[in-house]
Image: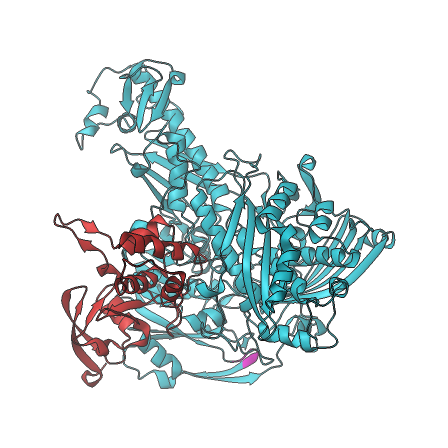
Chain colours: A red, B cyan
Amino acid sequence: MSTDTERTITLTVNGVPREATVPVRRLLSDALRHDLGLTGTHVGCEHGVCGACTVLVDGDPVRSCLMLAVQVHGHEVTTVEGLAHSDHQGGQVLHPVQEAFRECHALQCGFCTPGFLMTIAAGLEARDNSAELTEEEVDDMVGGNLCRCTGYANIKKAVHHAAEAMK
Amino acid sequence: MTTKLFGEPVRRREDARLIIGKGRYLDDIGHNALAAAFVRSPHAHARITAIDTDGALDVEGLVAIYTYEDLHGPMAEPLPVLIPHPQLHHPRTGYPLANGIVNHVGEPIVMVVATDRYIAEDAAERILVSYEELPVVVGVDAAREAANWVHEDVPTNVAAHHHQETGDVEAALAGSTRTMSFTQYIERSACTPMEGKGVHARWDADDSSLRVYTSTQASTSVRAAIAAKLELSLDKVEVIAPDVGGGFGVKIVHPWPEELLIPLAAIALGAEVKWTEDRREHFISSAHERQQRQEITVGYDDDGRISALDVHIWHDNGAYTPYGIIVPIVTATQLVGPYVIPTYRVRVESVYTNTVIVTPYRGAGRPQGCYAMERTMDRIADELDLDRAVVRERNLIQADQFPYDHHLTFQDGRPVIYDSGDYVGLMDKLKVLVGWPEASRLRDEAAARGKLLGVGMAMYVEGTGPGPYEGGHVQVLGSGKVLVSTGLTSQGQGHETAFAQIVASELGVPIEDIEVTTGDTRRFGYAVGTFASRAAVMSGNAIALAARGVKEKALRIAADVLEVDPGDLEIDEGLVQVKGTPGASIPLRTVAVLSNPLRYAFDEAAKQATQFAGPADDSKPPVAVGDAPGLEHVDYYSPIRSTFASGAHAAIVEIDPATWEIEIVKYAVVHDCGNVVNPMIVEGQVHGGVAQGVGGALYERMAYDSDGQLQNASFMDFLMPYASEIPDVVIDHQETPSPLNPLGIKGAGEAGVIPGTAAIASAIEDAVGRRISSMPISPTELYDLMRNDDSELTAAHARRSGTGAMA
C-alpha cells in the first residue's frame, strides 16, 4: 500500500489517546477491530442495516461499518470495551445497560449485543431518567438493530430494567 | 442444599465476557493472519471455459491464488455426502473449488490469499472467469417439470424418492366417509445468524500440527473431515469452535469448502490464514431451507376424525445434497404431529435446483410438516363447520396411549415412538392462554373499528435429542476447580450455564468452581454436534453421568480417609461429609489431591499425596487394579431413540383492509420439553424461535429470479424482523418428563419456530375468509389474493355474513 493512500490519524478511544496509520479506505469498524485490537465491536452486515457495529462518536451512536477510519481523526470514539468504568479500587463497574442485559437474559449468542448496548446506553443517557420510560421510547431505542436469537422481548425488558437503575 | 441448581433460572455465566466486548468470535482471532477472499460464480448454471488470473498478479500484497487445478488427492474429489441414505439414489456434491461446472450463484471458483482482506478482494476482482451459460432450474415446480436438468446425469432432477407408509392408504381413502385434496406451498428462508461462517488455520511446521478455529456446530467432525481431505493424522489436527455468533443449523453442515481450503493454504504457505464470510457471501453460498410443494389428500368422517392421510411432497434441495435427505425425512415423519393417523403414506421427491443448497434451518423440515398437517385440520374444520380446536381434539393421541408408535422411521434411523406427552393438556392450556372462546367477540370488535381479525392455532410434536451419542468429562482439580467438557458446540444456548447447573446439582459443588468447555477437540474428541435440539438431552445427560462417576469415586476415597461407609457420605458445597455428623468431613479438593498418589510435591496441596505423607497399606499398590489416578470421569449418553417434545401455538392477527398490513396482536405458546434445566434459558429459546417463525410466515423469503439470481441478498432486502415486527409472546409451560434419559429432559431449541407459519396462516385465513395456501404472505400478496375473483373463499366465510372479505 503506497503512502499516498494511507493517513495517520489520532483519536480518543474509550478515553485513551490513540494513533493509527491506516489506508484511507479502511472502515472504522475494521480499524477499531484490527488496527486498535478492540474486537468487541462486531460486523454483522457491512451495509449499515444490522447495527452490530454501533459505536459512539462524540457521544452519538453511529454504524462504524458505514464510516471510514480517517473520518474520526480528532474525534472521540466509545466502544463496548469503554462502557464499563473502573471504581477506586481498580475493579470494573458495569454500565446499568450491561447489568440489565445479563439480569434479563437479553443476549444469547452475544454477537449483536455490543451494538444494542451502545445504542441503548446512548439513548438512556440522552434522556431525563426521572421521567417514566415509555414503550415508544423503548421501541425507538431497540428498533434499528437486528438480533436473530432473542426475539427482542428480553432486550426490551432490559431497557426498562436499565432505565429503572438509572433513575 | 444450596448447590441444587437444576431447574433454577440461573443467570448466564457466558454473559460476563460477552457484555464487555471480551467474547472471542472467529474474526477476533489472528489479527496478523493472511486473509482469503473468493471469486464466486455470478451464474446459476454454467460451464467454466477459462480462468485468467494474470490481472491479479501485480496486486501488491497478493500471496497466492488457488483454483481447482491446485487441488490434489482427496481435495480434488467431490465434498462428502455427509448422511448417505439408500433412498438418496442420485447424491451430488460440489468441489472445494468448482471443477468445470457451477450449479448456483455463489459457488466458489478461485481462492485468493493476500496480506489483508481488502487486498484479497482487490486481487479477486481482477481475476477473469469465462463461462458458457447453461439452462437454469429455479423453484420446485420447474425442477418437477424437468424441462431442464441441474445435473446432466440426473434427467428428472430427482435426487431422492423418500417413501414411508403405515398401511394401504388408497384402500383407506376409498373407505373414508369424506375425502379432500389440495396443494399448498411454502417458501425458502434461511438461518442468517448474525455472525456468518469463518475459518482460521495455523500450521505449526516444527510440530507438523494444525490448529483450526471455525464457526461451526460440529468441531469433532470438521476435524475428521480436514484430516481425511488433507491426508493428515487425526492426532495432528485440532479444531475449536470459539464463541459462535448464532448457528440455527447452517453451521452443522461441514466441511464447508472454506473449512478445507483455509487449512490447505495455511499448510502450503506456512502462515496463519483466515477467512471471514461477509453477509452477501452468506446469502449466496451458505444454505437455505423450507421450500416445498405439498400435495395432500385426507380421508375423514363427519365428526372430523381422520382415517387416512396421503401426502406427496416436492422438496427443493438446491444444487447439492451434502446433508442427505434429513430435511425431507423430518418433514415426512414429524408431519403427523400429536394426532392418531390410522393410515398414513408420505412420498417425497427431493429435487435439484440451481440455487444455494438446502440443509437444516431451525426446525429442519418440521415447520413444513406442521404446516401440512395443521392446515389439513383447518380445512376439515371448515368443511364440517366445526371449531378448529374441536377437530384437533378429536384426533389427538390421548395421555394413556404413550408410548405411542407411529410405525415410521425417524431421521436417526430409529422408530418414531413418542415417549411421553399430554397433548390434551397442551390444547386446554392454549385455549385459555389465547382466549379461544373470545374469538368471535374480538372479531366483532375489530370489525367495528374497520379491521379484520382472525385467530389461528397449530400444534406440533418435535423429535429431539437424536443419537448416536454425546460424552462428558468431569474432573475435580486439587485447587477445587471442577473442569467440565463436552464435544458438542455452543452458539448462544447457554451451555456453559446449563451444564454447570447439572454438575453443581449432581456433584454438590458451588457453581462458581465449575468451568465448562464445549466444542474444543483438545478437550473432548468424541462428539456428534449441536443440532435437532439435542445439546441438553445428549450432553446434559452425559455430563450428569460423568459427574455421578466422579461422585462415586470421591465418596470411595473419602470413605477410606474418614473410615466410614461411602453410603454414609454426602457432598455439599464442595465438602464431603458424614451425613448428620458435623465436622466429620474432607474437602472435595483434598479428595482430588489424594486421588492421585504422588512422588513429587510440586505445591503445598500436593504434599498430602506424596509417598511419605501418611500411613499406607503396603500390601496394595498405590493405584488399585482397575482404578486410575485423578478424580475424574468420562461417560457417554447414547439414547435408544429420540425423545419427543411438544407444544401448541395460537396467533391473533388484525388486518387493515386499506393497506392489508398484517399485525399479530397476540401470540400464545404452550410448551412441553420435559424437565427444565434452566427455565430462563428455555423461555429465551422459545422467544427466539417464535421470532423466526413470525419472520418465516410474514417477511422472509429468498427471492430468486428465473435466472437463479438471488434478488435480496442483503439485510436491506431480506426482511429479517426487527423488534417492531415481533409481537409480545405469552407462554405457559407443561412438564412431561422423558422416561428415556436420566434427567427426564427433552430438547427445546427449535420448538418456537415450528408452528409459526401454520398458526399465522390459519389466523389470516380466519380473518379474511380466503384460502391461504402459500406462505409466507406479504401485504401485497394478500391484497392480490383479495382482489382475485378466482381465489377460494372459505366455507366459514360463506357462513359468516358481512365480515371478512372485501366487497
Residue B288 is inside the magenta segment: no
Q: Nearer the viewer, residue B668 or B96?
A: B668
Residue drawn 47% across and 51% down? B685
Above or below, B128 relative to B534: below
Is B220 displayed left or right of B581 in the figure? right
Picture coordinates of residue A161 (x, y %)? 34, 52
Closest to the observer, B103 or B564: B564
Quarter of the picture containing the C terminus of chain B is bottom right
Q: Nearer the viewer, residue B757 or A122?
A: A122
Residue B285, compared with residue A90, is above or below; it is below
Q: Main secondary structure of the magenta part?
A: loop
Does B144 sit above or below residue B634?
Answer: below
Left or right: B74 in relation to A85: right
Residue A84 point in image, percent of width and height: 22, 56
Q: Residue at x 36, y 52 (%)?
A: B236
Against B766, residue B462 (above or below) is above
Q: Name the spot of residue A63 as percent of width and height, x first.
A: 32, 72
Q: Which residues are magenta?
A: B43-47
**Residue B358 rendering spot, x and y as whole percentages:** 56, 64
Observer able to see residue A153: yes
In the displayed structure image, the side of residue B220 where residue B592 appears, left or right: left
| Snapshot quadrant of residue B418 | top right
- Residue at the spot x=33%, y=37% of the render? B511
For the question of whether residue B358 can be seen, the reply is no
